[in-house]
Amino acid sequence: MDTANAVLSFFLPLVISLVKQAGWDDRVNDLIAVLMYFAWAVIVVVASGALANVSDFWEGVKIFGTYFVTTLVAGTVAYQMIWKAFGIDDQLSLKTSVVKPVDEDVVVTEG
């Protein structure tokens, strides 16, 4: 399941690009990404049944933390090295955004 999580986390930034909005602040989009990585880690932990035989709370936290870190690192590396580097993330986010970025080149004058 760890390998499947890493491979699927490689493509998770593309899903995140569909959710985040080009017109929102970068911090908001970063928070969306972290929350989606967290949600994906929850799905993987539940689907794998990794917590089925856990008797200690902290052992469960450790298992979840491992899945979350794997998801976060694999997704972030893929995002930085491929999806962002080649502009795929920006284009996908811009095309699917409801909230478009403000065009900063436009100057409005009265008169």
Image: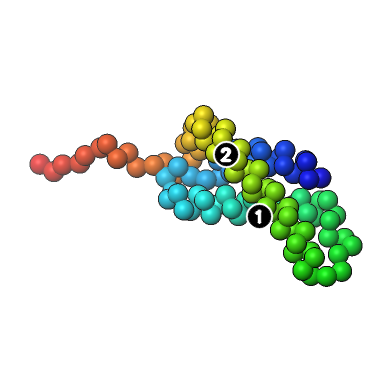
Using a 10 Å C-alpha cutoff, classify the residue at mark 1 as few (fewer than 14 neighbours), some (14 to 19) or many (20 or more). some
Quadrant of the frame with the N terminus? top right
Compared to 72, does 91 lie above or below? above
View extreme (right): residue: 53
Q: As displayed, is residue 70 above or below residue 63?
A: above
Under mark 1, the amino acid is Phe
**Mark 2 or 1: the one toward you:** 2
Furthest-left residue in view? 111
Q: Which residue lies furthest to the top in this view?
A: 86
Q: Which mark, by number, is residue 20?
A: none
Of residues 11 and 18, the one drawn nearer to the viewer in this rendering: 11
Q: Quadrant of residue 104?
A: top left
In the picture, measured across the screen, residue 41 lies left or right of residue 101, that is right
Position of residue 83 measured from the top left corner of the image (x, y, whole percent) = 56, 34
Q: Would you say 97 lies left or right of 58 here?
A: left
Question: Within the image, what quadrant is residue 52 found in?
Answer: bottom right
Which x, y percent locates residue 18? Answer: 56, 40
Q: Residue at x 87, y 69 (%)?
A: 55
As measured in the structure, the alpha-carbon distance from the residue carrying label 2 to the one carrying label 1 is: 16 Å
- Quadrant containing the C terminus is top left
Return the disc, 2 or 1, that comes first in the chain's sequence: 1
Q: Give the residue number, with chain letter if any, for mark 1.
A: 38
